[in-house]
């Protein structure tokens, strides 16, 4: 990351030319997301005794996501009104065109389209198209079908278990390219953006980052301790590699497969991890909620059309619903902001152009906050459903049970069976 930033500042053209390195690495990670989600959910759901247990996990997760998104909206509103960061900025024709492009991108999706889009064209197209929620639906249906098959499903579950080991092994190979991907991604964004945009729009960036930190440590941290008795700093330290990966690629999806593996290693049951993490990536967008609120107030202030409190509430509720429809759009935060303003307050759309230049840096804070929120949500849902092993978590967070970076799975390295517990071949029925 440091070398990438240096190259971007010293030779901007070379930095921009290195963008394919970062793009290729993120694409390799995204290639693994669907098979990992499928295997994890099928193995989790197929191994439970009652289907109602899966529904309980999903209901708790969605309820929690709704509450925390509302809290994030409220915090963004408070800070945005206090700071008023858009005062004194000027729009140019170039920035207006950039805003129109983002509005067109965000306007391609709406809530109905999003809901219908959860259903894949065929049973296997969810894997080929890389749609997380489509994969989630197919995996749930498969898991319930195997659950209904009873003992006859055992060979299929064993086969999927072997496929999961293969998929995670491929992922561990891809992770060797992470430094190269981080280098290319950072060199490209610094080379394209430079420092001018950061200087002129430093107030909104700083306010946004501070708000995200306040949300994570002021809301998520105390809640995690009260419910699960887990220290937030220890959990974030445990996920340190994933945070660096997100910081360098500006994509929380790049860390989704590793989050699934690490949450299982931490002591959260496979069904809870398999349902909460993929669903959270589309519905638990705490960082995006803060971004939408603060950016909306910023745009309104910068264009000289400040919003009344009632307008702020109605517009942001509308945009939170619309954000679910843009979950799979590249640069979803900026596209959702522009698309939401286009359909609700068209006179404010041009102001989106002011933050196009720094959106890549704000995207990092969005992704980091979303990722932290999903990690905490997984532990909380696991605790509420009785599917969280606190003793195991204590051992993992203290370093006594380190995560296996070579396989990303625990069952490949089971401890040897003590001699006293082994069967003597000479005395066996065979």
Image: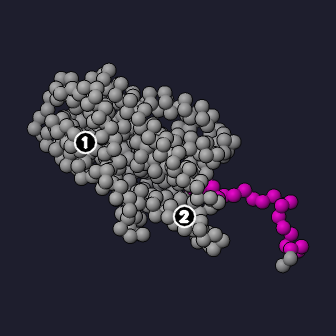
Q: Which mark is residue 143?
A: 2
Residue nearest the observer in this picture, 168 or 135: 135
Way the structure is coloured? one colour
Q: To which quarter of the image does residue 291 belong?
A: top left
Placement of 2 over or under 298, stated as above or below: below
| Mark found first going from the N terminus, 2 or 1 | 2
Position of residue 373 in the picture relative to residue 226 (left or right): left
Circle 2 crowding by C-alpha within 10 Å: few under 14, some 14–19, many from 20? many
Find the magenta span and give its range: 404-428
For the point 19% across and 37% down, the residue is 345
Q: Position of residue 13 (x, y in %)?
A: 22, 45
Instruction: Please check the rendered image and state whether residue 143 is part of the magenta-colored stretch, yes or no.
Output: no
Placement of 48 over or under 202, stated as above or below: below
Circle 1 crowding by C-alpha within 10 Å: few under 14, some 14–19, many from 20? many
Q: Position of residue 98 (x, y in %)?
A: 17, 43
Residue that label 1 marks: 340
């Amino acid at each position: 990351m440091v070398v990438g930033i240096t190259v971007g500042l010293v030779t901007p053209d070379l930095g921009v030319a290195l963008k394919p390195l970062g793009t290729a690495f993120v694409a390799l990670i995204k290639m693994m997301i669907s098979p990992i989600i499928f295997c994890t959910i099928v193995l989790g759901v197929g191994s439970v005794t009652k289907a109602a247990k899966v529904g309980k996990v999903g209901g708790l997760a969605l309820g929690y996501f709704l509450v925390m998104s509302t809290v994030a909206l409220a915090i963004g509103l408070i800070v945005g009104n206090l700071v008023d960061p858009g005062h004194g900025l000027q729009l140019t024709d170039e920035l207006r065109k950039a805003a129109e492009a983002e509005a067109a991108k965000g306007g391609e999706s709406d809530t109905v389209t999003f809901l219908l889009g959860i259903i894949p064209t065929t049973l296997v197209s969810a894997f080929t198209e890389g749609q997380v929620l489509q994969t989630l639906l197919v995996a749930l249906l498969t898991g319930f079908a195997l659950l209904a098959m009873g003992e006859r499903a055992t060979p299929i579950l064993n086969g999927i278990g072997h496929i999961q080991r293969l998929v995670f092994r491929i992922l561990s190979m891809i992770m060797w390219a992470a430094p190269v991907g981080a280098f290319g991604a950072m060199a490209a964004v610094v080379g394209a953006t430079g420092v001018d945009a950061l200087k002129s729009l430093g107030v909104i960036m700083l306010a946004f980052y501070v708000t995200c930190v306040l949300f994570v440590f002021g809301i998520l941290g105390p809640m995690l301790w009260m419910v699960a008795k887990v220290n937030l700093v220890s959990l974030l330290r445990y996920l340190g590699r994933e945070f660096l990966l997100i910081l360098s690629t500006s994509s929380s999806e790049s860390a989704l497969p590793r989050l699934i593996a690490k949450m299982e290693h931490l002591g959260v049951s496979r069904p809870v991890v398999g349902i909460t993490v993929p669903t959270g990536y589309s519905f638990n967008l705490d960082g995006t909620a803060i971004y939408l609120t603060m950016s909306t107030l910023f745009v309104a202030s910068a264009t000289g059309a400040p919003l009344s409190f009632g307008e702020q509430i109605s517009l942001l509720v509308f945009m939170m619903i619309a954000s679910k429809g843009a979950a799979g759009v590249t640069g979803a935060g900026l596209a959702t902001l522009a698309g939401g303003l286009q359909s609700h307050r068209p006179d404010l759309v041009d102001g989106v152009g002011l933050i196009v230049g720094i959106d890549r840096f704000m995207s990092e804070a969005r992704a980091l906050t979303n990722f932290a929120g999903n990690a905490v949500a997984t532990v909380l849902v696991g605790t509420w459903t009785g599917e969280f092993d606190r003793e195991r978590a204590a051992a993992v967070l203290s370093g006594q049970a380190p995560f296996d970076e070579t396989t990303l799975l625990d069952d490949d390295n089971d401890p040897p069976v003590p001699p006293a517990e082994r069967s003597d071949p000479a005395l066996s029925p065979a």
